[in-house]
Amino acid sequence: MKKLITLSTVLFCSTPFITYAETTKTLPIIEQQPQVAGYYQHQVDNTQITALLDGTNFMSPTLFKDISQDQVHDILKKYHADQAKGVQTSINAFLVNTGNSLVLVDSGTADCFGAHLGSVLKNLKAAGYQPEQVDTILLTHLHPDHSCGVSKDGVANYPNASIYVSEDEANYWLNPKQLNQIPKEKQANYKGTVEKIKASLAPYQAKKQFKTFKLGNKIKDFTVISTKGHTPGHFSYQLKTTDQDVIFIGDIVHSHTVQFDHPETAIEYDIDPKKAVQTRLKQFADYAKNGQTIAAPHLPFPGIGHVYSADEKSYQWIPVHFKD
């Protein structure tokens, strides 16, 4: 009697038996790979807002004020954000194409804080724009993680742009007499910050492309909103479109976890912590009630979304849904 030999039998017999251990030996070690370009384009009516990632940084949990470290870590654990490195934060800038103007809101760090940051210019180009096309730069304030990115090594990164910052902010950082008003224990840090700010703005000041504004002024299609506290001249920018308002809020918040659960919590970076908290409480209540779209430089990239509250005491960050 002939034995029936099937195709599967032949294949099985002709294929060497490979153990799991042998297959795993051939696999390469997978290392962390560079991420793709960090930009996200968000369409609002006929306006295109491109979020540009400068990079991610880590803050110490001890920077949060008037809250216990146990509370901080409980909140971070709830959001799966309790990391050994610290509290992860994005640094974002926003490129706004209104059809009439190309406006950059904040500019990132350039090389002021190390190689892990400073990608705004690269990501702007990856998004299909050229720095020469930017005609206006709106700085929410002059901290180096917002202002350093306008230039590098004494050369303007956006040669055709005029920079705008509030008059109060410019006076605080650029008036030499201000140093006498700074507590002695903080003067060294203040002077170091001023050096970075002056270096970044110098190419624009030389060509008279550095301008200041006051409350009540309007720049291009943007209304300025005083949100002082984090710095004395901190401003946000409101862009009205047909269907919705978009507000570029600057540093009224640094954490989508701790400062949303406990908005009364200041952070060490605030120059006037009490005023910073008052501003956040006032603005958050307004955003939650009226549903404005928010663009934030230190919330998880792309930093565009909405503020929600169920009880008008604590809040939640609701990021925009991805659209392609």
Image: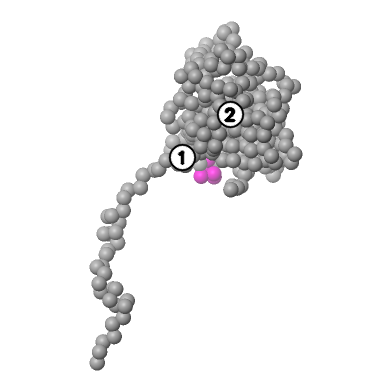
Q: Nearer the viewer, residue 279 or 119?
A: 119
Q: Which residue is mark 1?
A: 83
The vertical placement of 269 against 245, above or below, is above
**Residue 186 appears in the figure:** no
* Residue at 51%, 44% in the rendered image: 80
The location of residue 43, given as percent across then percent down, is 65, 41
Q: Dot 1: within a 10 Å radius of its alpha carbon, few (fewer than 14), some, or many (20 or more) residues?
A: few
The location of residue 299, given as percent across then percent down, is 57, 36
Main SS category, magenta section: helix
Q: How is the image coloured?
A: one colour
Q: Which residue is mark 2?
A: 133
Q: Farthest residue in the bottom direction?
A: 1
Q: CA separation, marks 1 and 2?
A: 39 Å
63 sits left or right of 237 in the view: left
Q: Residue 284 falls in which quadrant of the image? A: top right
Marked residue nearer the N-terminal end (1 or 2): 1
Q: Amino acid at mark 1?
A: Gln
Q: Residue 34 falls in which quadrant of the image? A: top left
Label count reads 2
Q: Amino acid at mark 2?
A: Gln
Q: Is residue 199 magenta?
A: no
The vertical placement of 193 against 266, above or below, is above
**Residue 14 appears in the figure:** yes
For residue 209, the mark is none
The location of residue 13, given as percent across then percent down, is 25, 74
Q: Nearer the viewer, mark 1 or mark 2?
A: 2
* Residue at 67%, 34% in the rendered image: 99
* Residue at 55%, 22% in the rendered image: 159
Secondary structure at numbered mark 2 = helix
* Residue at 46%, 39% in the rendered image: 83
Secondary structure at numbered mark 1 = loop
Q: Which span is picked out in magenta?
A: 76-80
